[in-house]
Image (cartoon, grey):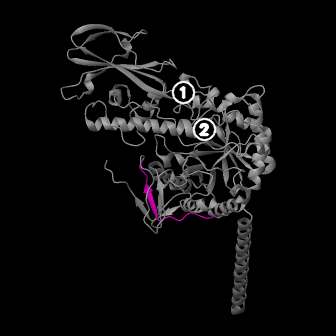
């Protein structure tokens, strides 16, 4: 009886295992069938998009419909909208002109923005909008000098000690166009014969400064240098924004200034979209950073104290000589202008100063923009996270859509960003990695270029982790077939244009890109090596036959753990080797 029961039990277990195997195989087959069907007919969201640029006042409702219908017919999945300076001189417009004459930010212009979103929805296209007029970075006429990017400025006066002094300190130079200046501090320093300044010889005499710049001071014995520090606007404007609506870049270290910008431009676009925000309007985007360096604002001192635990004011002479105009911390470490205490201590202050700026850029600009965008369900932020004063990977990890770029015919331009953007996606568990694709210099982006010239570069970009191509560029055609070839993309970019000879045959090319992008979004990236990525390095090299990711210091410390002898991340990534930069502490 026991044997019979045992046999019966084993038969039940065996039948269960067979049934489970059949079920799993059936699910795998169904899964493979689904993959095959989606490979044959790629979903709309996997199709390449185009950078769609409106130039000056040359915009028409009919042209918008023609452009978007042409995209749909060519297998393009959507657009990334920019409003730039005129492509055809707007001065040609007059009351008798046949040219469109739509003033940027007018009611007519906003109506056309809304119309383009509705047309995208009608055609099943995906809409992305740059967060600002121009292509870098975030600003407009609503940004006043006090809300703009700020920089430290200073003037120096040399005095001899042992006297009661009364003099007017020179106000640091500022741009008279903006006429904006605020004092930060007045310091007195007395270097020794070698130029070294001890902490005891750095005096904060800011309280003695009068409103008119006059100071009265009993000067101690010795040779003294009085430094009057202030801050003013950097004067940076968004790159290529239309002339008649040009304005300053917003403060990148203060999200309250960013909020002013958000409410006036990207937030307004999202409101114009209404129920289509998160449906056809999927992304707000920040292009590569080209707004220059900011190193101060009214909140910076308190932010520094909060983060670093000490007051930066009496250390500011170390900054002297490293003005934004002649120093770029994105490409090399700063060297002290004046040494206080020692070279090592001065360099440690510079590290703290730069780190504070980096953190504020990432938190008060990029992360804050991300949070503002997320007020609209279903909308995400796309970021090209480079050319700014912070670790590319550390910032890219914070965004759901990290992006890079690559240029046609020039392997030195942009290609290094691709595997870094992909690394950030792998760390954070994001499946999509975007790229501005096939940007081209004038001699390389001419009308003779066709998909035949682009395929090898597309495959290389895919191998570096990209799975969402944004083709650069398709200009808006406001005139239709009345003007051939119509509006062109200026000096840079491919001529993605319905007037191009291969346009009607481009469906196969765009479908190829879509199929690759669909497949490359499936599964988990397999890597052997994880590189701790230094702030100023451009890209990283993986030995032939291996795969690898870059990781930033904060992700390494906060996220990485060891399991079964492998370095692991919560996203599912696993590595066998961690490579550290050749540095000393």
Q: Distance between the residues labelled 1 and 2?
A: 16 Å
**Identity of the residue drawn at 43% across and 31% down:** 304
Whichever of callouts 1 and 2 sits on the residue coming sooner in the sequence is 1
From this view, report whether residue 56 is shown above or below residue 118. Answer: above
Q: Does dot 2 land on a helix, a strand or a loop?
A: helix
Please count the marks in the image. 2
On the image, the x and y values in percent for residue 295 come to 44, 31
Name the image quarter holding residue 517. Answer: bottom right
Which one is nearer the viewer's eye here, 195 or 21? 195
- Position of 125 with respect to 220 (left or right) is right
On the image, the x and y values in percent for residue 144 come to 57, 23
* Quarter of the image with the N terminus in it: bottom right
Q: Does dot 1 land on a helix, a strand or a loop?
A: loop
- The residue wearing badge 2 is 369
- The span shown in magenta is 522-534
Question: Which numbered tag is attached to residue 148?
Answer: 1
């Amino acid at each position: 009886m026991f044997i019979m029961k045992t046999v019966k039990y084993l038969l039940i277990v065996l039948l269960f295992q067979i049934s489970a195997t059949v079920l799993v195989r059936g699910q795998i087959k169904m899964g493979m069938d689904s993959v095959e069907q989606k490979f044959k007919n790629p979903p709309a969201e996997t199709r390449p998009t185009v950078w769609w640029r409106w130039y000056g006042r040359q915009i028409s409702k009919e042209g918008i419909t023609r452009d978007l219908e042409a995209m749909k017919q060519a297998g393009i999945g959507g657009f990334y909208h920019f409003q730039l300076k005129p492509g055809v001189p707007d001065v040609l417009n007059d009351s008798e002109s046949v040219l469109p004459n739509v003033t940027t930010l007018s009611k007519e212009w906003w109506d056309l923005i809304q119309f383009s979103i509705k047309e995208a929805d009608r055609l099943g296209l995906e809409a992305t909008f740059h967060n600002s007029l121009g292509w870098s970075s975030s600003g407009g006429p609503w940004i006043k000098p006090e809300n703009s990017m700020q920089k430290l400025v200073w003037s120096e006066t040399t005095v001899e000690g042992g006297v009661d002094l009364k003099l007017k300190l020179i106000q640091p130079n500022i741009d008279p166009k903006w006429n904006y200046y605020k004092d930060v501090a007045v310091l007195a320093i007395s270097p020794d014969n070698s130029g070294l300044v001890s902490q005891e010889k750095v005096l904060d005499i800011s309280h003695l400064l009068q409103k008119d710049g006059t100071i009265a001071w009993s000067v101690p014995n010795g040779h003294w240098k009085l430094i009057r520090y202030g801050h003013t606007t950097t004067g940076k404007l968004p790159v290529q924004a239309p002339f008649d609506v040009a304005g300053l870049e917003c403060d990148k270290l203060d999200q309250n200034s960013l909020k002013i910008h958000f409410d006036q431009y990207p937030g307004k676009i999202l409101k114009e979209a209404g129920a289509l925000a998160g449906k056809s309007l999927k992304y707000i985007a920040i292009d590569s950073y080209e707004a220059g360096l900011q190193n101060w604002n009214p909140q910076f001192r308190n932010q520094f104290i909060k983060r670093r635990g000490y007051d930066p004011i009496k250390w500011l002479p170390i900054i002297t000589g490293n003005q934004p105009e002649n120093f770029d911390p994105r490409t090399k470490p700063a060297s002290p202008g004046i040494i206080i205490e020692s070279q090592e201590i001065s360099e440690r202050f510079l590290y703290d100063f730069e780190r504070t700026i980096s953190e504020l850029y990432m938190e008060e600009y990029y992360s804050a923009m991300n949070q503002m965008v997320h007020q609209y369900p279903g909308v995400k932020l796309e970021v090209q996270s480079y050319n700014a004063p912070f670790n590319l990977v550390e910032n890219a990890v914070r965004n759901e859509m990290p992006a890079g770029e690559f240029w046609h015919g020039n392997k030195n331009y942009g290609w290094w960003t691709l595997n870094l953007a992909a690394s950030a996606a792998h760390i954070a568990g994001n499946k999509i990695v975007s790229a501005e694709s096939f940007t081209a210099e004038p001699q390389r982006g001419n009308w003779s270029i066709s998909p035949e010239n682009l395929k090898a570069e597309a495959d290389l970009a895919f191998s570096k982790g990209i799975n969402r191509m944004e083709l650069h560029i398709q200009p808006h055609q406001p005139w239709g077939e009345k003007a051939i070839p119509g509006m062109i993309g200026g000096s840079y970019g491919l001529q993605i244009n319905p007037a191009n000879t291969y346009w009607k045959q481009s469906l196969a090319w765009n479908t190829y890109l879509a199929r690759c992008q669909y497949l490359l979004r499936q599964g988990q990236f397999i890597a052997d090596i994880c590189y701790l990525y230094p702030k100023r390095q451009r890209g990283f090299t993986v030995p032939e036959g291996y795969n690898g990711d870059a990781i930033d210091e904060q992700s390494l410390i906060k996220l990485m753990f060891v399991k079964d002898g492998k370095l692991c991340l919560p996203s599912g990534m696993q590595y066998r080797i961690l490579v550290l930069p050749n540095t000393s502490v």
